[in-house]
Each structure stands twice: as structure tokens, then as C-alpha cells.
Image (cartoon, rainbow, N blue to C red):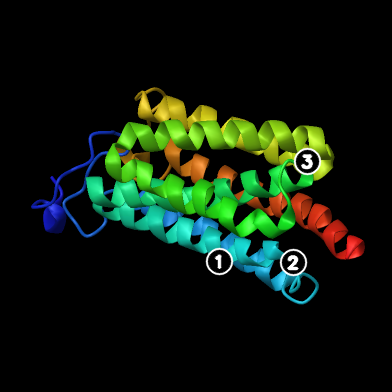
């Protein structure tokens, strides 16, 4: 029951929210994806002047793309947009992973762009080859990124981001497993996947604050 998108291949991975025969197949999950755009706007507004020399200034645009990708996927719940949804996330994990390699002195700053082509752009090809390859690659990038981030400069912002992400991932997993799903009047209002969108979007705010401090050291070293 997908209405306008019925002729397109439905994704094979289910979530708690049942399909609706309308332009928004999963209304709650679609609307909650705009949390990424709201956080991106907040970060851009707060740091647009002070961080204009930092590579991190591009992160709000990446988060905006993630939000739009997630909204398109949940609105249509099709395989093509599911792959796109995962591919866009590689822009963020790839950026952060590459930045951590520089912060750890495993990679020179002048090679940042070339490395990002592999981790961010190259990684984004995997979901289009096979959806589970996309998930596997994202998991590896995220785990390495988070581990190196803990070693580089643990702090309040980083710790808060991790707590939000861990809680969000737990909800994401149980949602895909069909556990804890709400039915009845709330089935198109609150679901674990909805909360995942909000928690992961909020974690970006703290990850950005964490990353900008590290990148400002680059400016001081120049």
C-alpha cells in the first residue's frame, strides 16, 4: 500500500511504521528527518562567521543532504532512495574519518581531499552495489571514526555525542527488528526510528563543536 510509489521497487528492510498509500509512505519518519535540517541550520547560524576558514564549515551542508536523503527515502520507501540515503551518510562519516586520520597524524592535511574521495565519495558507491555492503561500510567507518575520536581529544561534547548516538543506534536496531513498535493512534506519530532521527541529528551538533576545536588548531599551526 504505497500509492504514488507503487510502481517502484520497495526496499527490503522494514521499519515499525506501517505503509500509507500517499505521497508520504511513512509520514512520521519523513517529517522527523527534517531534524537534520534544523540542526544544520542551527550550527550554520551559530558558527558561520567564526568557522569560515575551517573545512568543517561544509558539515552543515552535508547534514542538510543527509536530512533530504532520509526524507526522500521514508517518503517513498523505495530501494533507490534507500541506497541514496545511505550513500549521503558516507559524506559525513567519510569526512570525520578523514579528519581523525589527520588529527592522529596518520594523514597529512594536503592529502585530506584525496582521502575524502575514497572514504566519502567512494564509500557512497557501496549501497548502490548492494544495500548490505552500504551498511557494512558505514559501520566500519563509524566505529573507526568514533574510536579515533575518543583517543584524539575526549571531552564533554564528544561524550555527549556518543551517548546520543549509542541510544539512537539501539532504537534503530530494535525498530528494524520490529521490537517496541507502537500501534493504533501513535503508529504514524512516534516510532523508534523517529527518535533515532532526532538523537542522531542532535549528536551532530556536539560532534561539530568537537571537530571545530580540533580544526582550529590547524589554523594556529599555520
| Residue sitting at x 36%, y 42% | 126
Q: Is residue 166 left or right of residue 130?
A: right
Q: Residue 112 location in percent, x, y?
A: 65, 55
Residue 48 figure quarter: bottom right
Q: How many marks?
A: 3
Sequence order check, earlier mark of 2 and 1:
2
Relative depth, front residue between 121 and 70: 121
Which element carries disc 2, helix, strand or loop?
loop
The residue positioned farthest toward the right in the image shown: 220
Query: Residue 158 placed where, x, y %?
Result: 76, 41
Res. 119 visible in picture: yes
Assess disc 3: are there few (<14), some (14-19) or many (≥20) residues with their C-alpha within 10 Å of its C-alpha: some
Query: Residue 135's mark?
Result: none
Secondary structure of the residue carrying tag 1 is: helix
In this rendering, which labeled residue sits more in front, label 3 or label 2? 3
Q: Earlier in the sequence, mark 1 or mark 3?
A: 1
Q: Secondary structure at mark 3?
A: loop
Alpha carbon separation for disc pair 2 and 1: 14 Å
Residue at mark 3: 104
Q: Is residue 124 left or right of residue 96?
A: left
Q: Residue at x 63, y 43 (%)?
A: 97
Label 3 vs 2, first from the N-terminus: 2
Amino acid at each position: 500500500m504505497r500509492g504514488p510509489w507503487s510502481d517502484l521497487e520497495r526496499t527490503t528492510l522494514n521499519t515499525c511504521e506501517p505503509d500509507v498509500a500517499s505521497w508520504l509512505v511513512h509520514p512520521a519518519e519523513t517529517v522527523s528527518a527534517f531534524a537534520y535540517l534544523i540542526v544544520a541550520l542551527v550550527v550554520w547560524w551559530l558558527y558561520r562567521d567564526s568557522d569560515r576558514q575551517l573545512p568543517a564549515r561544509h558539515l552543515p551542508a552535508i547534514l542538510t543532504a543527509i536530512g533530504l536523503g532520509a526524507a526522500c527515502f521514508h517518503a517513498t520507501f523505495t530501494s533507490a532512495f534507500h541506497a541514496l540515503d545511505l550513500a549521503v551518510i558516507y559524506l559525513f562519516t567519510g569526512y570525520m574519518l578523514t579528519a581523525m586520520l589527520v588529527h592522529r597524524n596518520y594523514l597529512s592535511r594536503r592529502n585530506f581531499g584525496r582521502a575524502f574521495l575514497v572514504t566519502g565519495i567512494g564509500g557512497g558507491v557501496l549501497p548502490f552495489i548492494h544495500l548490505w555492503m552500504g551498511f557494512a561500510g558505514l559501520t566500519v567507518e563509524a566505529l573507526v571514526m568514533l574510536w579515533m575520536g575518543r583517543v584524539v581529544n575526549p571531552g564533554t561534547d564528544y561524550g555527549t555525542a556518543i551517548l546520543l548516538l549509542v541510544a539512537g543506534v539501539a532504537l534503530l536496531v530494535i525498530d528494524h527488528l520490529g521490537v517496541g513498535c507502537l500501534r493504533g493512534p501513535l503508529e504514524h506519530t512516534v516510532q523508534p526510528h523517529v527518535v533515532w532521527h532526532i538523537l542522531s541529528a542532535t549528536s551532530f551538533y556536539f560532534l561539530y563543536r568537537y571537530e571545530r576545536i580540533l580544526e582550529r588548531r590547524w589554523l594556529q599551526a599555520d
